Image (cartoon, rainbow, N blue to C red):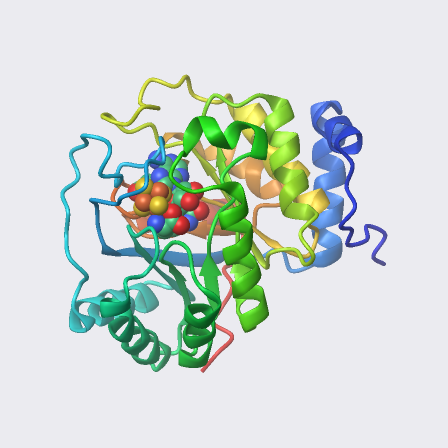
């Protein structure tokens, strides 16, 4: 029986109360909620590919691909369809059910847009779910992506509205909300989450999750990233967020958005197996799978399969032919 309802009217005081619960009481509530909506307790696997890398005009302080920071990652033009297809086939063979393509753009340029449409149409023929993250979208662009067959669009709120201006100056929180609205109105599924461990306070994490959960409709997919602190970015020396605080964030996200897939996203390389296990118990039911995120590294696929095996966690099989 479902006792935890889908709500869109979360108050900060209630969220703060969740964050402040004794750790095991919070985990118990999160896991009980999780099993009401996901009785099979399976893990969904998404593989990422950076289809256009680096030299991004935006100044996101965490991002190794921003043209404002000097990092080790080099600019690469939009990949050819043949190369993208090859990577998608490999991802499917390795067990991923969703293929997520990211581009270091403020918004997709008009001159490349027809190529993006072709990429979606081709990848769809492989029987994979498709996701893209290309920056801000106009209403018309969102509609065109949907018509080409794109299943999900990823666009993150990243942090609280209060902390946001310390992290990004080149576009506003409202810009992000507008893109999310365009994606929804076009009829695509929404993938929207953020990054913790950027030096924000617990109040910021409360406010960030309040924004996500009080959207008119919960995102179907909620990626929770732990900052990958990259040399050359302004956040390179940020102290790592403790594992228990990270697990708490996953648990609170699960309770507030009970029917959404919560993805344990970037940052797993520096997490122990035990921390990841706690995240799965707290309600994470999706991961980025494959050796690379966009430009930084991710655990080896065989290591992840072994971890899921040892935990007795089954993998979601593809639901499209
Ligand atoms: N340019 C597009 C945009 O910003 O919407 C798409 C790509 S961008 C790299 C996608 C997301 O990756 C960001 O919103 C952020 O949440 C996440 N991300 C980027 N760098 C990260 C890092 N160093 N650690 C954790 N997450 C990161
Ligand atoms: C998301 O929330 N995390 C992914 C995906 N959406 C696009 C990206 C993580 C990037 C980590 C740093 C990098 O490799 O660029
Ligand atoms: Fe550009 Fe996206 Fe990186 Fe921001 S997060 S700098 S928009 S690639």
Q: Provide residue 125's location: percent of width, then percent of height.
A: 34, 82
Count of marks overlaid on the render? 0
Q: In the picture shown, does residue 8 fall above or below 26?
A: below
The quarter of the rendered structure image containing the N terminus is: bottom right
314 to the left or right of 112: right
Quarter of the image for residue 102 reads: bottom left
Residue drawn 16% across the image and 68% down it:
80
The answer to whether residue 134 is visible is yes
Q: Provide residue 173's location: percent of width, then percent of height.
A: 52, 42
Q: In the picture shown, does residue 301 fall above or below 253?
A: below
Q: In the picture shown, does residue 238 fall above or below 66?
A: above
Residue drawn 28% across the image and 27% down it:
233
In this view, the residue in front, 284 or 184, is 184
156 to the left or right of 215: left
233 to the left or right of 131: left
Residue drawn 20% across the image and 69% down it:
86
């Amino acid at each position: 029986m479902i006792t935890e309802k889908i709500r869109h009217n979360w108050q900060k005081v209630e969220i703060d109360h969740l964050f402040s619960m004794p750790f095991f009481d919070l985990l118990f509530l999160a896991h009980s909620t999780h099993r009401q909506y996901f009785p099979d307790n399976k893990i969904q696997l998404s593989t990422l590919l950076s289809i256009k890398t680096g030299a991004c005009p935006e100044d996101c302080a965490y991002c190794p691909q921003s043209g404002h920071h000097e990092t080790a990652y080099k600019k690469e033009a939009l990949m050819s369809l043949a190369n993208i297809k090859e990577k998608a086939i490999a991802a499917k063979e390795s067990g991923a059910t969703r293929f997520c393509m990211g581009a270091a753009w403020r918004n997709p340029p008009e001159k490349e847009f027809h190529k993006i449409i072709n990429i979606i149409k081709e990848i769809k023929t492989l029987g994979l779910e498709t996701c893209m993250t290309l920056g801000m979208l106009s209403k018309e662009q969102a509609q065109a992506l949907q018509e080409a067959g794109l299943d999900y669009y990823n666009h993150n709120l990243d942090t609280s509205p209060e902390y946001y201006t310390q992290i990004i100056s080149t576009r506003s929180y409202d810009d992000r909300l507008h893109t999310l609205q365009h994606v929804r109105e076009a009829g695509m599924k929404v993938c929207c989450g953020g990054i913790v461990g950027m030096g924000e306070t617990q109040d910021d994490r409360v406010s960030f999750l309040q924004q996500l959960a009080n959207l008119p409709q919960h995102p179907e997919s909620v990626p929770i990233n732990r900052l990958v602190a990259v040399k050359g970015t302004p956040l390179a020396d940020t102290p790592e967020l403790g594992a228990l605080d990270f697990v708490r964030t996953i648990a609170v996200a699960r309770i507030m958005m009970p029917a959404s897939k919560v993805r344990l996203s970037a940052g797993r390389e520096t997490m122990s197996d035990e921390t990841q296990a706690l995240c799965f118990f707290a309600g994470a039911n999706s991961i980025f799978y494959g050796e690379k995120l966009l430009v930084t590294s991710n655990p080896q696929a065989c290591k992840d399969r072994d971890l899921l095996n040892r935990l007795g966690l089954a993998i979601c099989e593809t639901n499209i032919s």
